[in-house]
Amino acid sequence: IVIVGADGQVLGSSDPSGAAYAPAEKAEWTPLVGAALEGANNPARLVAQRTQSGPVALGAYPMVDQAGRPVAAALVAMTALSAPNQWWDLWHALLFFGAASLAVLAGASIFALASSSLVSYLLARRLVRRLERLGRAAEALAAGDLGQRVDAGADELGQLAQRFNFMADRLSDTLAELAAEKQTVEAALQAKRELVANVSHELRTPLASIRGHTESLLMRTDGANESQRAYLNVIHRQSEQLSHLIDDLFLLSTTDNGALPLALRPLALGDVVHEVVSSIQPAARAERRVSLVAEVDPDLPVVLADRQRVAQVLANLVRNAVRHTPEGGLVAVRAGRHAERMALVSVEDTGEGIAQEQLEHVFERFYRAEPSRDRASGGAGLGLAIVRELVTAMGGEVAAESKPGEGSRFWFTLPLLHPTDTTTVTPEGRPEAAVSPA
């Protein structure tokens, strides 16, 4: 191999003896070198008989710089007899070098692929674990564990964790504020209930004294003219209304405190219905000219209830119906079985009815569907609220149905006394029923 410069000077040779570029042969390879310096590749060809081994095959190839310009030529010379073997050896060498290069590249690629896969797996595993921790914290927070927090970092997932922690802090603070406000409200309500109970209790004694003295004066036949007796009657009626109002307030306060006494016993509901209707019937006929009738299912089973409270509930509903029924109207009280283990008592009138938007509020305290009418009749808007509290305390339900101009229907349910029930009464008077084993 001879390296020839652009000026035709030999720059180097693989033959230490220098025979490869003897001047006698220079004329033979000069055209090849010139063509190579112009950028042409000249394949090997027989050009001369230089050695005993036979003709010499010469080939010239350009050597270029970084810009691609030929700066020298590589002249390859070999004897014709040894050329095939040498070219074959060169081919094998190139093949081995290529295979080795491919093997190195393949090994490097496999190593890089394995390394990247391992790194990706570790990163993905860490990411999944962080997401799982965040998910578990969110589930615990939703279940009410407000102390849940997660570790936060500087990446996007860490920013998400920071927002989660911020949300948990805000939620914890908000719920703490709500709990404090709830305690404050409950304390205020408890104070109000105690105040109502105490005031109601304290008012009973002087009010009873006023009623007693008024009744004594009314019983006397001397010393009072008609005008004075009229005033005494007004005082007596108003004191009775005030007494009923105080009793209602005290009763509601007692139910609010969970201390309502109930004497739950087996009760023949039909007897109570007839008793209440009979007690109100004369006044309804005389004062309002309203017919009051009772219809009781003769096969109605015994219920479990407080006789006094049932009579109070029914009397409230009947008086309310009579009060809102015009002259010549009808109020019907019916009692029968409802569903499998309940009895139902309804009070139906032919009065003016109640609008739908008012009907859903009639059991609220101090609510009046017709304020002027209720005030004229002495109502304070507590009767139906007491009905709901008493019925609920005895394990029943209460509801109302009405259409303007067609009258109203109020009804309540009470639990039947089932033969398989073993019923006890709690200190607060609430029933606890247990079913005996089959």
Image (spheres, rainbow, N blue to C red):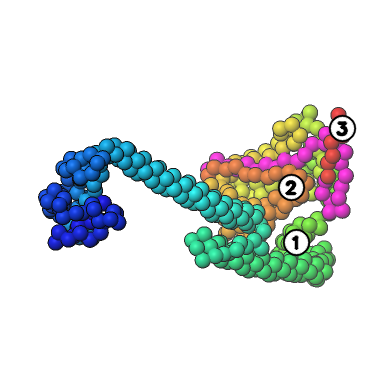
Query: SS class of the residue under badge 3?
Result: loop
- Left or right: where does residue 436 sit relative to residue 332? right
Q: Which numbered mark, 3 or 1, is in the foreground of this view? A: 3
Q: Which mark is residue 265?
A: none
In this view, the mark in front (3 or 2): 3
CA distance separating discs 2 and 1? 16 Å
**128 inside magenta stretch:** no
Camera-nearest residue between 301 and 167: 167
Give the mark nearer the N terminus: 3 vs 1. 1
* Residue kind at label 1, given as amino acid type: Ser
- Bounds of the magenta segment: 405-431
| Mark 1, secondary structure of its residue | helix
Q: Amino acid at mark 2?
A: Val
Q: Secondary structure at mark 2?
A: helix
What residue did someone put label 2 on? 391
Q: On the image, numbered disc 3 is attached to which residue?
A: 437
Q: Does any portion of residue 121 appear in the rendered image?
A: yes
Q: Which residue is mark 1?
A: 253
